[in-house]
Image (spheres, grey):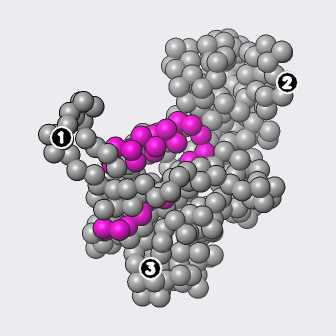
Amino acid sequence: MEFKHVSVLLEESIQGLNIKEDGIYADGTLGGGGHSYEIAKRLTTGRLIGIDQDEDAIKAAGKRLEEFKDRVTIVRDNYMNMRSVLTDLGIDKVDGILLDLGVSSYQFDEAGRGFSYREDAPLDMRMDRRRALTAGQVVNEYSESDLFRVIRDYGEDKFAKNIAKHIVAARQEKPIETTLELAEVIKGAIPAKFKAGKGHPAKQTFQAIRIEVNGELDVLKSFLETAPDMLNKGGRLCIITFHSLEDRMVKETFKKLENPCICPPGFPVCTCGRLPQAKLVGKPITAGAGELQSNNRAKSARLRIIEKI
């Protein structure tokens, strides 16, 4: 299957990066290379570092960016390790970083990857298939309390306790091996009156398990701790999120970078000595009507931008 992915908020994120033709930029979630193509197209003597942990994405992006090979370097790694990737390439700081935290269309549509609750496939959900932990292990080996925690915290599903209970009961009969088997178990855990008009009942649990398998929030947290130090003065960090947990983490981090002061609100003068590292660029951006019409997956996308000062 060809690696396909429609880049969300493409124009907005490219504008947000404020690209200089001689600048150095990093795309930490390369995917099919959609955003990176537009960045590379705007460079003359500049350089783009594209990072992705998915082998299929690396192959697809390599083909797509072939015409820019003199200015593009592609690395298979997790964006959490961006600092070390840049260091290995002899780069101290960059002029812009882009993250698109959505699961690619390819990963959802390629049934064998196990991301979709609409296609039958082994329970996998690994973005990097070199990782050991799979969705099957989470579903069949986690304790009921750990399943409850994952579904509650990462899926924000109010039926998390009942879903965990049903999963444990079902796997006592036989291991839950496929995506559709799991989806059916989840359906059975949610009262009928809550199923209508709320989207697929397995959506939030599948999201939760995917986040757990890939350590997505830990990866984002680790990256956000190092990101400011990777930017030149005036450099921009653009992050596209797709669910509230990620967005909340990005929002809070950006807020602290802009206003790190920890003095009590009543203090007339700041005494903590913590100085702003960055400033917010505009308000959060969401997809317009035209993009929503052509790409339903853009519905929950939110772009936040910050600039190093």
Q: Amino acid at mark 3?
A: Lys
**Crowding near pointer 3: few (<14 within 10 Å), some, many (20+)?**
some
Q: Which residues are magenta?
A: 232-257
Image quarter of the N terminus: bottom right
Q: Which residue is mark 1?
A: 269
Q: CA distance from mark 3 to mark 1?
A: 38 Å
Residue 25 located left or right of residue 83? right
Q: Earlier in the sequence, mark 3 or mark 2?
A: 3
Q: Amino acid at mark 1?
A: Val
Q: From the viewer's perspective, is the residue at label 3 or at label 1 nearer?
A: 1
Q: For this rendering, which residue is in front, 121 or 227?
A: 227
Q: Earlier in the sequence, mark 3 or mark 1?
A: 3
Q: Are marks 3 and 1 in contact (CB under 8 Å)?
A: no
**Crowding near pointer 2: few (<14 within 10 Å), some, many (20+)?**
few
Q: From the viewer's perspective, is the residue at label 2 or at label 1 nearer?
A: 1
Q: Which residue is mark 3?
A: 20
Disc 3, SS: loop
Residue 67 located left or right of residue 194? left
Residue at the (79%, 18%) spot, across then down: 194
**Residue 244 shown in magenta:** yes
Q: Amino acid at mark 2?
A: Ala
**Crowding near pointer 1: few (<14 within 10 Å), some, many (20+)?**
few
Q: CA distance from mark 3 to mark 2?
A: 50 Å
Q: Which residue is mark 2?
A: 196
